[in-house]
Structures are given as structure tokens and as C-alpha cells.
Image: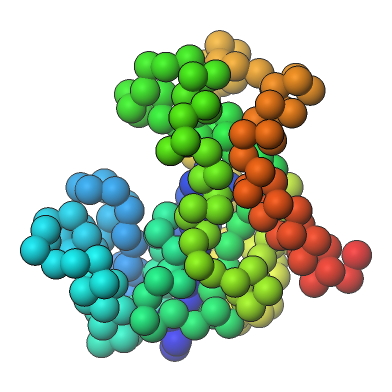
């Protein structure tokens, strides 16, 4: 089976899909490339991406691609766009998108819960490195050639479309939701806050607009 490439944009519902993949593919057919020493990161990807400082990034990408091909990897997932891999096939790729204000709030809540920031929501979202996260993660991938594009608000139908397109049996799971405590005590989004976040993330706003339009078109709506 040719590999599937999941372009996992942060805080767009992708964790649920990653767990679903673990239910339908053998563990040795999954390659996950996430953070340094993260539980989700496969040992090979962890060694290459985080413990091989002598390798330039181009060589690391070749190493990952070679591993995918030589080990018949069925499912590659990462916050780094799979489009950078030499073995990338856009027809076998998919991505899930989320409205900008909701994605930004979820990203902040996650970073805070992980102890990675103590900043206020406003200060955190003003920083350049925290803007346009979806666009940065999607990277050089072409929205029009990616096999399946979906939106989080239609997640169940997105999974159904994946299964129809690729002949897979991904179950519909809902994991990694924001905690009740975070929802009760964290920031909320009124119209002004949403407008502010959209102004700070114009690339993501445009990317989501195009992704939603493609999803509607693909679904015949």
C-alpha cells in the first residue's frame, strides 16, 4: 500500500485522526515526526530530526523519505508539511482546517496547559511566531492537489470521505478536547476578539477560506 500523508495542522482535530490511524495500521507502519522526545514521535524520526545536528535539513528530509519507502510506511503524520519529503504524493495526502479564532484559542490553551507559556492570551497571540500557524504547518503543499481537504466542523463527513477516497477504515474519534477547567477559566472569544485574531492571522484566514470552499465544492454543496 502506498503511504498516506497526513499534514497535521496544530489544533485542528488531527490528534483524533492520529489515534484513529493507530487503530487501523500496525505500529511499525506508522511514522510520526513531532517534537523532541514527544510520546507521539517515532524513534527513528526523533533521532533524525532532533538528535542529528550534523545533518542539514535537506538530508533529514531525504532520510525520512527513504525510511517511508524502504519500510512500507502506511501513514506519515507531522506538524511539518509532508510536502517537503521527496517521496510526497499529493494525491495520497490530506489535511484538516479550522476557523482561525478557534484554532488560535485552542493553540494557546494547549501551550499554556503544557507549561510552555505563562503569557496572557493577548500577548501570546501578538508574537510573530504564534501567528498564521496553519499556513506555516501546511507549508509548500498545494491546496488544490491535496487528495482530501476537510474542515473540523464537518469532521465526521471528512473521515467518511477519507475512507471512501483511500479505501481505509478510519473510525470517528474525538480526542484531545480542551478541558472543562480551561473552558471555564480561559479566555473567550467575542466578536471583537475574533476580529482581532483574524487581523493578526491574514494568511490563515485566506487559507481557511480556500479550504472551506474546496470542501464545499468536493461535497457538491
The image quadrant of residue 159 is: bottom right
Whether residue 93 is visible here, answered yes or no, is yes
Tell me the residue at 49%/61% (across/down).
139
Tell me the residue at 60%/72% (across/down).
142
Residue nearest the observer in this picture, 131 or 88: 131
Figure check: 83 above or below 158: below
Tell me the residue at 58%/29% (across/down).
105
Figure check: 124 above or below 69: above
Q: Position of residue 80 (x, y in %)?
A: 40, 59
On the picture, is 192 further left or further right than 166? right
Outermost residue to the right = 221
Figure check: 129 above or below 149: above
Locate the N terminus and report the quarter of the image it occupies. Answer: bottom left
Q: Position of residue 14 (x, y in %)?
A: 52, 52
On the picture, is 2 further left or further right than 56? right
Locate the C terminus and report the quarter of the image it occupies. Answer: bottom right
User: How many numbered tags mark residues here?
Assistant: 0
On the picture, is 102 further left or further right than 125? right
Amino acid at each position: 500500500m502506498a503511504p498516506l500523508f497526513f499534514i497535521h495542522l496544530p489544533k485542528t482535530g488531527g490528534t483524533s485522526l492520529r489515534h484513529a490511524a493507530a487503530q487501523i495500521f500496525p505500529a511499525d507502519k506508522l511514522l510520526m515526526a513531532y517534537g523532541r522526545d514527544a510520546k507521539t514521535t517515532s524513534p527513528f524520526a526523533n533521532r533524525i530530526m532532533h538528535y542529528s545536528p550534523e545533518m542539514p535539513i535537506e538530508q533529514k528530509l531525504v532520510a525520512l523519505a527513504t525510511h517511508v519507502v524502504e519500510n512500507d510506511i502506511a501513514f506519515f503524520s507531522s506538524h511539518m508539511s509532508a510536502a517537503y519529503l521527496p517521496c510526497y504524493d499529493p494525491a495520497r495526502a490530506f489535511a484538516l482546517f479550522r476557523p482561525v479564532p478557534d484554532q488560535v484559542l485552542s493553540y494557546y490553551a494547549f501551550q499554556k496547559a503544557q507549561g510552555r507559556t505563562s503569557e496572557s492570551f493577548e500577548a501570546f497571540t501578538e508574537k510573530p511566531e504564534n501567528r498564521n500557524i496553519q499556513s506555516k504547518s501546511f507549508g509548500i503543499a498545494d491546496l488544490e492537489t491535496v487528495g482530501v481537504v476537510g474542515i473540523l466542523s464537518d469532521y465526521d463527513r471528512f473521515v467518511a470521505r477519507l475512507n471512501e477516497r483511500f479505501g481505509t477504515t478510519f473510525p470517528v474519534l474525538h480526542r484531545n478536547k480542551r478541558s472543562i477547567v480551561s473552558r471555564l477559566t480561559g479566555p473567550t472569544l467575542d466578536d471583537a476578539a475574533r476580529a482581532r485574531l483574524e487581523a493578526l492571522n491574514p494568511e490563515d484566514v485566506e487559507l481557511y477560506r480556500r479550504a472551506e470552499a474546496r470542501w464545499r465544492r468536493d461535497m457538491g454543496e
